Image (cartoon, rainbow, N blue to C red):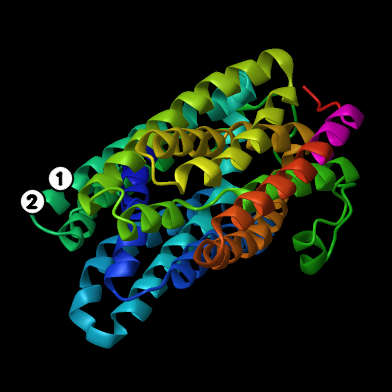
């Protein structure tokens, strides 16, 4: 199911830069929309994590979130028909698609954390992410073929097909496995009677979560905010003439293949060695703008590979650490808080990257490098103090 769903939204994300540019957006607008999209996908999990834990409606929220993605992405194909309103409509659809991710992600991650215990959480999240990336690889290829044959708008419209497949598979999966918590024998699947009852706002703010969790969340979020979005990279490659528009989704597909490999490899290493493997992420993030936003094709390819590797670890093994730091009854809430902190830095990072890109590439490279030094120091200190439960 995740494979099919990733075909939809990763296929679309591969051309967000060229799509927004075609509708008249500047680099700042591209950075703002893509950064705000990531912020919506992350920050609003602050709300939907506690909702999932309080109501137990993990499946319902997962289905609603994927449904928004399946609908909003194909609707982007209507943007050029709307004239002056096209850019605003496209930005709205992008933000709604990211809202779908915010709705579903805490619930989906909580469900996955239960079933992954039987194979190791690093491996479980890694395998899941790798299957995601098969779809993330295939989706941009489909879009690229449609762009070559027809137009970028046709590429968005055709993504309605894997979207429908994903929803059918998701409904079938819920019917077959109504309670994934039954796979997790290591911890109780629901809160005990002596668990303190907190207000909704306190839950959303992460009341009761450990200091180690928050230090880890800030460190990981600095890597998220510092990772230049592919929207900026795609915009650069298109506007500067480094690659034709049809080639941009192909490059994105290659990055998704790297992301899948990174999720599998780092996930397995994490189960054997622990979270020290995550120290490679700030180094990779710092390399991305220096390489991917250049004019030499070899450097661009290396930068996109670093981007894909960092993205793969951020979306898989980093989440496994959260599952180890937080007990099952509060995992959806913890994932929401974690993502909220990530989102705040994502919108700042995306907007700042677009602003700096138009003024000084050197300044962008330096700013990202400095933030990643801070992230590395925080990670080292946090991992020394914290020993995640296994």
In the image as oriented, which residue stretches furthest toward the bottom?
A: 84
Residue in the foreground of this view, choosing between 357 and 143: 357
Residue in the foreground of this view, choosing between 219 and 200: 219
In magenta segment, residue 308: no
- Rendered location of residue 74, percent (x, y): 25, 62
Which region of the structure is painted magenta?
378-386
Q: Is residue 348 above or below residue 89?
A: above
Residue for badge 2: 149
* CA–CA distance in space, label 2 to label 1: 6 Å
Q: Is residue 248 above or below residue 276?
A: below
Q: Are marks 2 and 1 in contact (CB under 8 Å)?
A: yes
Residue for badge 1: 145
Horizontal side, residue 186 vs residue 1: left or right: right
**Which residue is located at x 33 percent, y 61 percent?**
239
**Which residue is located at x 53 percent, y 39 percent?**
311
- Rendered location of residue 386, percent (x, y): 87, 31
Instruction: Considering the whole magenta stretch, tell me its main secondary structure.
Output: helix
Q: Give the quarter of the figure containing the C terminus.
A: top right
**Which residue is located at x 29 percent, y 54 percent?**
241
> Which secondary structure lies at badge 1?
helix
Horizontal side, residue 211 vs residue 272: left or right: right
In magenta segment, residue 384: yes
């Amino acid at each position: 199911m995740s494979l099919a769903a990733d075909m939809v939204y990763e296929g679309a994300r591969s051309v967000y830069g060229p799509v927004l540019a075609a509708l008249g957006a500047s680099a700042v607008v591209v950075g703002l929309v893509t950064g705000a999209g990531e912020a919506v996908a992350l920050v609003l999990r602050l709300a939907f994590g506690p909702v999932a834990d309080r109501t137990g409606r993990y499946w319902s929220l997962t289905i609603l979130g994927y449904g928004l993605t399946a609908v909003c992405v194909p609707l982007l194909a209507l943007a050029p028909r709307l004239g002056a309103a096209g850019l605003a409509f496209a930005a709205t659809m992008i933000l709604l698609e990211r809202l779908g991710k915010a709705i579903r992600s805490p619930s989906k991650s909580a469900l996955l954390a239960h079933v992954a215990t039987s194979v190791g959480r690093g491996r479980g999240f890694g395998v899941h992410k790798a299957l995601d990336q098969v779809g993330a690889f295939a989706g941009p290829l489909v879009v690229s073929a449609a762009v070559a044959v027809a137009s970028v708008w046709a590429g968005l419209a055709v993504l309605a097909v894997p979207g429908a497949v994903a929803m059918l598979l998701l409904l079938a999966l819920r019917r077959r496995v109504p309670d994934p918590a039954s796979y997790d024998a290591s911890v109780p699947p629901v809160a005990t009677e002596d668990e303190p009852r907190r207000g909704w706002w306190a839950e959303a703010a992460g009341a009761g979560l450990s200091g180690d969790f928050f230090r880890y969340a800030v460190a990981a979020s600095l890597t998220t905010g510092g990772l230049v979005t592919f929207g900026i990279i795609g915009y650069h490659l298109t506007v500067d003439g480094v690659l034709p528009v049809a080639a941009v989704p192909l490059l994105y597909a290659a990055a998704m293949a790297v992301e899948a490999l990174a999720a599998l490899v780092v996930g397995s290493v994490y189960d054997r060695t622990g979270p020290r493997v995550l120290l490679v992420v700030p180094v990779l993030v710092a390399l991305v703008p220096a390489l991917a936003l250049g004019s030499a094709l070899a450097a661009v390819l290396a930068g996109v590979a670093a981007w894909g590797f960092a993205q793969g670890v951020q979306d898989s093994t980093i989440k496994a650490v959260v599952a180890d730091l937080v007990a099952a009854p509060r995992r959806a809430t913890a994932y929401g808080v974690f993502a909220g902190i990530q989102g705040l830095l994502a919108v700042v990072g995306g907007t700042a990257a677009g602003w700096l890109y138009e003024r000084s590439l050197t300044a962008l490279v330096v700013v990202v490098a400095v933030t990643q030094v801070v992230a590395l120091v925080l990670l080292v200190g946090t991992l020394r103090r914290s020993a995640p439960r296994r």
